[in-house]
Image: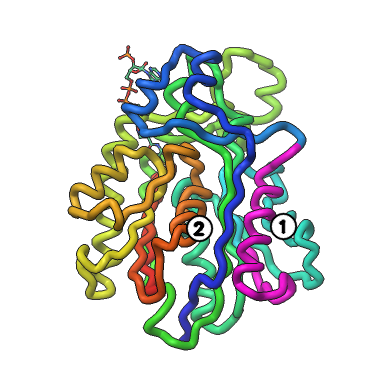
Amino acid sequence: MYHSRISGLGHYVPDNIVTNDDLSKLMDTNDAWIQERTGIQERRHVVKGQDTTTTMGVKAAQVAIDRAGISKDDIDFIVFATLSPDYYFPGPGVLVQRDLGLSRTIGALDVRNQCSGFIYALSVADQFIKTGMYKNILVIGSEVHSTGLDMTTRGRSVSVIFGDGAGAAVLTREEDTTKGILSTHLHSEGQHAEELSLIAPGMGKRWVTDIIADADPNDESYYPYMNGQFVFKNAVQRFSEVIVEGLKANDLQVSDIDMLIPHQANLRISQFIQQKFQLSDNQVYNNIMKYGNTTAASVPIALTEAWEQGKIKEGDTVVLAAFGSGFTWGSAIIKW
Ligand SMILES: CC(C)(COP(=O)(O)OP(=O)(O)OC[C@H]1O[C@@H](n2cnc3c(N)ncnc32)[C@H](O)[C@@H]1OP(=O)(O)O)[C@@H](O)C(=O)NCCC(=O)NCCS
């Protein structure tokens, strides 16, 4: 068995900065409320015609590929995590295969695990590399939320939180099995599926034909719904559990963590975890202040920034953890 290591990281966010004050012109909200409850100061929104989930993913991927020092045609497989694909189908994995101009007809897989999507995608890629099937895998997390949010007061408890962006990693075969991804831990609890969800359009409860026939401007089923306090309570519990599970599996202690990259759901959740584990500010990376919650993109964007800022060095123990819609949650323990 091999290990896999992250050989290249990249991220891309749209130029368009949307501040809390900008949102307060669209809905009844204010900077103080948003910062106090979430820590968010601003987020990025795509500009129509400029960026999509796929194009942002491709831009992040190009950086990651260059930094990995490989040619794009060395990539053996693509795993793309998103809840906001360009098309209902096909998923964005194949669009990346096309838009990167890959000469080989490599496989492309789409992962739909929302906020924990990148960790699920990383875990899938890790298994393919471990078994020797593939050598280099491109893993992308990218989201466009802004075009699907209710930007009126009705949707304010959700709309102020989410932002757009993309992050990518190249996973490469590592012969030294003391290095790279040591383990990944994935969980779900489907009984809470509707607590953080977007119901329509779907082939279950809100058929496309019903939506067209109803043409109801008050239909909220196309907007994300979130039971905020319930999500918060579950998040702090599951984040803690899955971090401890990952550490235990590798005989590590909380004190061994050099860098924790939590999914950027809410700064208050990250701070709760940091306090619970008594980690210093240098051991936890947060950037939700600048980008909001970018769902599947949040972990790879934060990981890329932490690495770019020299906060992750060779030999460090890096922990990734995420929780979100599904509910799904997961962690990855990495020896850098
Ligand atoms: C969403 C969240 C910030 C809301 O904070 P909260 O303290 O639970 O706030 P509530 O929803 O109870 O709302 C409190 C009040 O603020 C109001 N409010 C909601 N959104 C608001 C906004 N953007 N601006 C101003 N007021 C707002 C509510 O209407 C409510 O008013 P009321 O008391 O008059 O009814 C918080 O629940 C949260 O962060 N949950 C986790 C979200 C998360 O992590 N999601 C992603 C998971 S991956």
Q: Quadrant of residue 336?
A: bottom left
Q: Is residue 253 left or right of residue 168?
A: left
Residue at horizontal 47 percent and vertical 37 percent from the top = 292
Say if 172 sits above or below 265 in the image. below
Q: Quadrant of residue 314?
A: bottom left
Secondary structure beneath disc 2? Answer: helix
Q: Quadrant of ligand 1?
A: top left
Lower position in the chain sequence, tag 2 or tag 1: 1
Tell me the residue that label 1 is attached to.
Answer: 96
- Does residue 63 belong to the magenta stretch? yes
What's the distance in space between the residues labelled 2 and 1, CA to CA? 20 Å
Tell me the residue that label 2 is attached to.
Answer: 304
Q: Amino acid at mark 1?
A: Val
Name the spot of residue 25 as percent of width and height, x first. Answer: 54, 13
Label 1 residue near ligand 1, CB within 8 Å: no
Name the spot of residue 201 as percent of width and height, x first. Answer: 62, 32
Q: Amino acid at mark 2?
A: Thr
